[in-house]
Image (cartoon, rainbow, N blue to C red):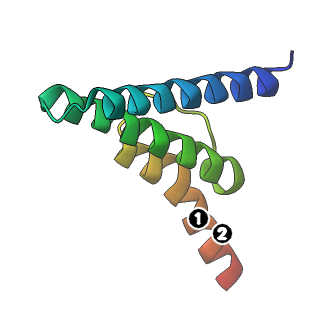
């Protein structure tokens, strides 16, 4: 298995676990603080997955999954987009 295939497998596995977490909270009818925390986990996991796709095209994916999302956008996406923007203007 190549490194890329392994990363795809890991991302797919995480996506399945997030879906299971969301389904469990729905089925249990949870409306508590614990359910709210699960919602934040789900939201972050889904955001990381989308950022991985975007950074794979427009930035770089050389960042850990637990990096602060603002740092991901600034250091691994925004800088590349700025270079593309200003590179095209010249």
Closest to the observer, 34 or 79: 34
Pointer 1 with pointer 2, Cβ within 8 A: yes
Q: Quadrant of residue 31?
A: top left
Residue located 36% across and 48% down the image: 70
Residue located 47% across and 30% down the image: 18
Judging by the rendered image, the residue that carries numbered circle 2 is 84
Circle 1: is it few (<14), some (14-19), or many (20+) Cα within 10 Å? some
Vertical order, 43 against 65 (above or below): below
Residue located 43% across and 53% down the image: 74
Closest to the observer, 54 or 44: 44
- If the image is split into quadrants, where does the C terminus sit? bottom right
From mark 1 to mark 2, how far is it between C-alphas? 5 Å
Q: Position of residue 89 (x, y in %)?
A: 65, 84
Query: In the image as oriented, which residue stretches furthest toward the top?
Result: 1
Judging by the rendered image, the residue that carries numbered circle 1 is 81
Circle 2: is it few (<14), some (14-19), or many (20+) Cα within 10 Å? few
Identify the secondary structure beneath mark 1: helix
Q: Is residue 85 left or right of residue 38?
A: right
Residue located 65% across and 29% down the image: 12
């Amino acid at each position: 298995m190549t490194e890329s295939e392994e990363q795809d497998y890991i991302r797919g596995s995480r996506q399945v676990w997030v879906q299971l977490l969301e389904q469990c909270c729905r089925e249990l009818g949870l409306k508590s603080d614990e359910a709210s925390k699960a919602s934040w986990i789900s939201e972050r996991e889904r955001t990381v997955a989308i950022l991985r796709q975007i950074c794979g095209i427009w930035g770089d994916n050389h960042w850990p999954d637990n990096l602060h999302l603002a740092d991901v956008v600034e250091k691994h996406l925004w800088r590349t987009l700025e270079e593309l923007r200003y590179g095209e203007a010249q």
